[in-house]
Image (tube, rainbow, N blue to C red):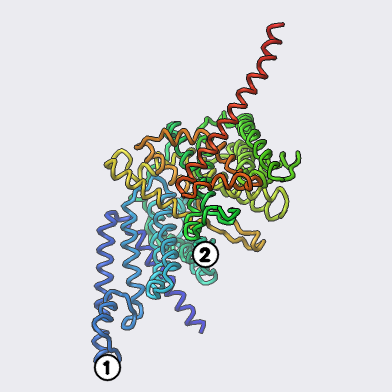
């Protein structure tokens, strides 16, 4: 039995090395599309050379009675009745062709290479397997494709990023004897025998989670190939496909009108989100009738509004010069937000008192900093904004030489800290604050990284061919990206990493807004550049006030205000009526504040004249 296990393990490791080497050599040799097509055709010809004689022999012996349709399926490797390894051949062909297709996308940074060649194919295979429970052949194909496409992608990543050359540099400049290079080969064999496949987390899909699993051979195959190359006397070559390095220059930014228009779009999404996707918030028989289908499909996509606001906060913060990202600037921004929010909160408290709610000074203070949300139901963002602006000056001082270190500092570290606080002190105000941070930080961190590392200018602009392709094609690509990011929040909202301790509380829930928010804002900005955005910009200038004033319809004051909101009974009219009500309330508050400032300025001016 031990000999059989050794033989099976050696065969499995050999197949993994073959797949890894295929991906490596495809990229290393150039002309990836042509070479991939030749390899796929050669694999199919070899398969047919085995299939046809075996089919003839089985039929002659009376062991196989397949119809024409079944024979055609077997020829296309969609069955394994004649040749047991037919599925592996088909998956090898699909993996090679997929790698060739992805190679046509430009990669302005090594992170794009890892995402396109490794993470994206593995994710697609697992998602397809999850959404096709009624198609067993597709599921079997995806199960075969998953390890193969991961190893092909890993070979491509190693070739494009010159990983072997970097490993040679890490081992030192001096020459080593060939016997030394047996160590990585033996280590790879030992890891393959001892380690299980690695589940790094789970991608949360609709109603369930799909484990994000990588084969252990992603680590073993490169290590074995690296040692074997030196044993055979081969030198690791530099990559044939060069990636462009990110420049030191900052992101190109966007016009003020466009940023305000994006806020206006986000506010409209938020109003639709709150008005029509939470039927449990409705009161009375005259409330707008809920659509369960609309609520279930659009509740998460419409919540894109929050990552958009958070992204813009981090984006414009990172565009400031480093010497101006100070704690004084953060306190100034926090003070400005609280100065705008306090009058709105007073109005909400007054309306709540008219509805019979009991409010105290302590309640007002907790609502003011977003740690209590009974009167102002959506004020959690205030708490998040305060904590984010206090943390950003500290995090900005940590050196971030590349995108990976920036991700660890700006996203992974705050998410881990907030998760730890939430797990250590459940049910406290600290846990409430930590949850507020978790709800918005991924979007904010994505904004900081986008501006700091020029991910739009040297990333999406390069991939989409901004300024090089026809404008219509570029805008169509942006519209497709906009829809992909919008509905992606419904199908895959977050990635969950389970730690070996802590149980449910020890799960790191990383929102996929890290990817969705930059893509959504980029595509929306490009489309708004081609359109007139004045009306949206006007809405965006007061977006925070309108957001907070809409709490009157669903907080403690909803017995008084909600029937007024749903009076039109037509969804489009309800949305416009809600925007107009909040805009009128914001205009009235601003008018009262201006009048109060003038009244207060008169005695001060008289005192100056007397002096």
| Occupied quadrant, residue 39 | bottom left
Residue 503 numbered mark, or none: none
Q: Is residue 257 left or right of residue 387?
A: left
Residue drawn where x is 36% and y is 60% of the image: 23
Residue drawn where x is 60% and y is 48% of the image: 554
Q: Is residue 449 visible?
A: no
In this view, which residue lies farthest toward the bottom? 62
- Of residues 481 and 568, the one nearer the viewer is 568
Q: Is residue 576 left or right of residue 40?
A: right
Residue 61 numbered mark, or none: 1
Counting residues from the N terminus, which is met first, the one under dot 2 or under dot 1? Answer: 1
The crowd level at tag 2 (other Cα within 10 Å; few <14, some 14-19, many 20+) is few
Residue topped by disc 2: 207
Q: Is residue 114 left or right of residue 202?
A: left
Q: Is residue 434 left or right of residue 287?
A: right
Q: Secondary structure at mark 1?
A: loop
Please state the horizontal and vertical placement of residue 461, each as a whole percent of the image.
37, 41
């Amino acid at each position: 039995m031990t000999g059989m296990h050794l033989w099976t393990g050696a065969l499995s490791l050999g197949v993994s090395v073959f797949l890894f080497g295929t991906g490596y050599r495809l990229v290393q040799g150039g002309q990836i599309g042509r070479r991939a097509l030749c390899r796929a055709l050669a694999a199919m010809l070899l398969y047919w050379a085995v299939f046809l004689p075996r089919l003839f022999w089985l039929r002659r012996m009376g062991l196989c009675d397949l119809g024409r349709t079944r024979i055609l399926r077997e020829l296309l490797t969609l069955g394994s009745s004649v040749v047991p390894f037919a599925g592996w051949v088909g998956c090898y062909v699909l993996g090679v062709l997929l790698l060739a297709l992805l190679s046509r996308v430009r990669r302005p940074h090594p992170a794009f290479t890892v995402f396109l060649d490794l993470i994206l194919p593995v994710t697609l295979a697992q998602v397809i397997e999850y959404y096709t429970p009624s198609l067993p052949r597709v599921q079997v194909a995806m199960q075969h494709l998953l390890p193969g496409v991961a190893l092909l992608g890993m070979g491509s990543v190693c070739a494009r990023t010159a990983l072997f050359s970097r490993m040679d540099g890490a081992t030192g400049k001096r020459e080593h004897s060939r016997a030394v290079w047996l160590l990585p080969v033996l280590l790879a064999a030992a890891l393959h025998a001892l380690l299980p496949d690695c589940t790094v987390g789970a991608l949360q899909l609709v109603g369930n989670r799909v484990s994000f699993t990588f084969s252990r051979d992603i680590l073993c195959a490169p290590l074995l190939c690296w040692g074997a190359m030196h044993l055979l006397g081969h030198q690791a070559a530099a990559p044939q496909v060069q990636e462009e390095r990110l420049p030191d220059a900052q992101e190109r930014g966007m016009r003020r009108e466009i940023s305000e228009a994006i806020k206006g779009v986000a506010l409209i999404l938020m109003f639709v989100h709150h008005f029509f996707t939470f039927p449990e918030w409705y009161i009375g028989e005259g409330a707008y009738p809920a659509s369960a289908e609309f609520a279930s499909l659009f509740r998460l996509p419409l919540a894109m509004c929050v990552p958009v606001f958070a992204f813009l906060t981090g984006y414009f913060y990172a565009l400031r010069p480093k010497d101006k990202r100070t704690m004084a600037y953060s306190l100034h921004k926090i003070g400005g937000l609280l100065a705008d929010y306090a009058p709105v909160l007073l109005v909400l408290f007054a309306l709540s008192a008219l509805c019979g709610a009991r409010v105290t000074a302590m309640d007002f203070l907790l609502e003011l900093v977003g740690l209590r949300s009974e009167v102002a139901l959506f004020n959690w963002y205030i708490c998040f904004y305060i904590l984010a602006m206090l943390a950003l000056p500290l995090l900005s001082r940590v050196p971030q030489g590349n995108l990976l270190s920036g991700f660890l500092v700006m996203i992974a570290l705050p998410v881990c800290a907030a998760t730890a606080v939430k797990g250590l002190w459940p049910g406290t105000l600290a846990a409430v604050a930590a949850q507020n941070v978790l709800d918005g930080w991924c979007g904010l961190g994505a904004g900081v990284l986008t501006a700091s590392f020029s991910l739009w200018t040297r990333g999406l602009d390069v991939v989409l061919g901004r300024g090089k392709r026809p404008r219509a094609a570029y805008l169509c690509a942006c519209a497709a990206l906009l829809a992909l990011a919008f509905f992606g929040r419904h199908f895959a909202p977050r990635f969950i990493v389970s730690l070996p301790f802590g149980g449910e509380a020890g799960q790191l829930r990383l929102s996929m807004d890290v990817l969705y928010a930059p893509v959504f804002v980029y595509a929306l900005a490009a489309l708004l550049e081609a359109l007139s955005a004045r009306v949206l910009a006007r809405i965006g200038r007061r977006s925070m006030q309108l957001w907070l004033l809409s709490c009157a319809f669903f907080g403690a004051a909803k017995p008084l205000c909600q029937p007024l909101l749903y009076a039109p009974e037509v969804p489009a009219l309800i949305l416009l009526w809600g925007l107009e009500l909040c805009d009128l309330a914001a205009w009235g508050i601003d008018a009262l504040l201006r009048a109060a400032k003038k009244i207060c300025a008169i005695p001060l001016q008289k005192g100056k004249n007397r002096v």
